[in-house]
Image (tube, coloured by chain):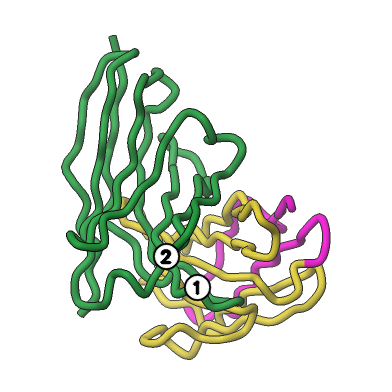
Amino acid sequence: EVHLVQSGAEVKKPGESLIISCQGSGYNFANYWIGWVRQMPGKGLEWMGIVYPDNTNYNPSFQGHVTMSVDNSKSTAYLHWSSLKASDTAIYYCVRHMGAATAGLDNWGQGTLVTVSS
Amino acid sequence: IQLTQSASSLSASVGDRVTITCRASQTVNHYLNWYQQRPGKAPKLLIYGAFSLESGVPSRFSGSGSGTDYTLTITSLQPEDVATYFCHQTYSAVWTFGPGTKVEI
C-alpha cells in the first residue's frame, strides 16, 4: 500500500529556518514526482510546486521563498524555508504525481501543520 | 489559468443528485481533476483527466466536461459525502486549484 508520511507539527518564530519531510513507501519513489500543496487556516488549496527528475517547477508565488528537493536514496522529499514569515502558518501536504499527462495527485501525505508566531 | 467553482457551498438531501461545476479562464484540455476533502483530513483524488474514476472511488461519482467547463456529479448523495470538493488543472505550467465547494446535508 502506498503511503506518504510527513514529519510532525512545527512551531517556529519569524525569521527562523525550517525543513519538513515526506517519506514515501509502498512504491518506487523515484518513478513518481513529488509536489507540495499549502492550505492556510480555513482556506483552500494552493499548489506550491513539483519536483521533476531533472528540475523543479515552482509556482511563482512561492519561488524564492521555499526550496523543494528529493533524496531518492531515502525515498524522502523535503520542503525548506530559510526565513519563515507569520504568513507561512498553514498545513503543508506532500503529494504524488505519476507524471502522466492527465494524471492527478493520487496520494497525499497526512499534512504538516507549521505555525509561525513571535 | 484561474479556476472558479459554481458555488462556494450547497445543501442537499441524502439520495439527491448533486452537480458541482468548475470553469477555467482558458481551455485546460481535459487536464482537470477533482478532489474530496473531508473535515480535518487530507484531500483525496476522485476524478482525473476530467472523467476517469480513481481506483476505489464509488461509482456514484463521475466527471464530465471539455474545454473550459467541467462538472463533478454525485448521483445519489450519501452522508459520508459531506466534504469540500476542489477542481484542479495541470494543463498550464503553473497548476491551480479551484476555491472549493462545500457540500452539506
Q: Mark 2: which secondary structure?
A: strand
Q: Residue pushed farthest bottom?
A: B59
Residue of label 1: A99
Q: Which residues are magenta?
A: B1-27
B22 shown above or below A49 = below
Q: What shade does chain A have? A: green
Q: Which mark is residue A33?
A: 2
Q: Residue at x 55, y 60 (%)?
A: B86
Q: Amino acid at mark 1?
A: Gly
- Which quadrant of the structure image shows residue A53? bottom left
> Whole-Å distance between the Cαs marked 2 and 1?
6 Å
Q: Residues within 10 Å of mark 2 (few under 14, many from 20)?
A: some
Relative to residue B38, is residue A100 depicted above or below? Answer: below
Chain of the residue on which disc 2 is drawn: A
Residue B54 image-quadrant placement:
bottom left
In the displayed structure, does residue B76 sit left or right of residue A2? right
Q: Mark 2 vs mark 1: which is more N-terminal?
A: 2
The answer to which quarter of the image holds residue B63 is: bottom right
* A48 or B48: nearer the viewer: A48
> In the image, residue B17 lies at what x, y percent?
60, 80
Q: Residues within 10 Å of mark 1 (few under 14, many from 20)?
A: some
Residue B6 painted magenta: yes
Which residue does the image show at 32% across and 70% down from the upper left?
A30
Q: Residue at x 42, y 60 (%)?
A: B37
Q: Colour of chain B?
A: yellow
- Residue shown at the point (40%, 87%) measured from the top left: B55
Q: Position of residue A6 (x, y in %)?
A: 22, 51
Disc 2 vs disc 1: Cβ atoms closer than 8 Å? yes
Q: Quadrant of the C terminus of chain A?
A: top left
